[in-house]
Every structure is written in structure tokens, then in C-alpha cells.
Image (cartoon, helix red, strand yellow):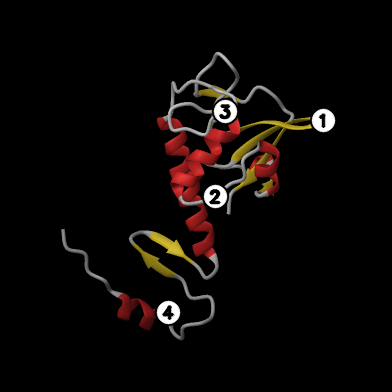
Amino acid sequence: MTMRMHTPNLLARAGTVTALTLVTLGGTTVAPGAAGNAEAASVSAHALRIAASKSGAPYRYGAQGPHAFDCSGLMLYSFKRAGRLLPRTAAAQYGRTRHIPPGARRRGDLVFFHSRSGIYHVGIYAGRGRMWHAPKAGSVVRLERIWSRSVWYGRVG
């Protein structure tokens, strides 16, 4: 299939190009400053796919993959494979993310479980109120509903 670009006609109709020029490439509209957001979303989506690919891998305390994981080890492994480095622990990972409200969460964001004593668990948001995570000893990496309201969300930049 051959695609024709009608950029000169589009620019002629749009008039003078301003600082807020929009460029459409392959059906995706990109505005100045949006490239960083698009790249972060791409990295997070890739990390989500990697975490999901580890479904059934056993939980092992301190494990960072590729065959066994603890919760923060799964996040570290997934994002490292997607091109972003995260710290080792869930609390340190929370400190390295951009904190976002629940209504702004999207697939690939990290889900941090907290109590009065701090952050104790992390997973990666998969949409529809679910996340991929390595739950606890004796279990495996799996997709599960977020069971608590005591969660914070963080976006890896």
C-alpha cells in the first residue's frame, strides 16, 4: 500500500506555521512537548507486556528475574528491559516516579500499596482495576484485581 503525503496542501491551507504547529504522522498527532509523554507511554506499555509475559513465574524474596521475582524485582526487571532503570525497592521506586491521581492512571503506571509504616508492595497497572504483580511467597506472577483503596500511583518518566 502506498501512502501519499499532502503536507504542502495542508500547510498552505493552515497558513503561517506557528510555535504550536501540529504534525500528524501515521495517524498520531504530536504537539511540541508531547514526545516525552509519548515515549514514556511507550516504555510503560512495553514494561507492562514484559511483566505479563512473566505470568506463572514463582515469587522469591529478593529475586529480580528472569525466572523468579519479588514485587519490586518484577518492576525493576520489566522497566529495565523496556529501557528505564528503577531502584530496587518498592519505596524507592515510588520516590522515582511522578505521582498521579487515581483518575489519571493508565496502563503501565505503577501501583503502590501503603500503610502507616510506608509502602509495602508494588504492581503494574493493566487497566480495568487490575495489575500484574508478584504477590507473596508460595505464589506466582499473576494478573489480579487491586484489592485495596490504600494505593498510590506513579508514572515512570
State left or right for residue 61 relative to residue 114.
left
Q: Which of the two residues, 21 or 91, is positioned nearer the viewer here?
A: 91
* Nearest to viewer (mark 3 / mark 4): 3
Q: CA distance from mark 4 to mark 2?
A: 42 Å
Q: Label 3 sits on what residue type?
A: Asp
Tag 3 near tag 2, CB within 8 Å: no
State left or right for residue 80 relative to residue 137.
left
Q: Secondary structure at mark 2?
A: loop
Q: Quadrant of the N terminus?
A: bottom left
Write down the residue under mark 1.
117
Write down the residue under mark 4.
14
Number of marks: 4
N-term-proximal mark, 3 vs 4: 4
Q: Label 1 sits on what residue type?
A: Ser
State left or right for residue 141 relative to residue 94.
left
Q: What is the number of the mark on residue 55?
A: none
Q: CA distance from mark 2 to mark 1?
A: 26 Å
Q: Residue at x 61, y 47 (%)?
A: 155
N-term-proximal mark, 2 vs 1: 2
Q: Is residue 29 above or below residue 77?
A: below
Q: Residues within 10 Å of mark 4 (few under 14, many from 20)?
A: few
Q: Secondary structure at mark 1?
A: loop
Q: CA distance from mark 3 to mark 1?
A: 19 Å
Q: Secondary structure at mark 3?
A: loop
* Nearest to viewer (mark 3 / mark 1): 3
Write down the residue under mark 3.
70
Tag 4 near tag 1, CB within 8 Å: no
N-term-proximal mark, 4 vs 2: 4
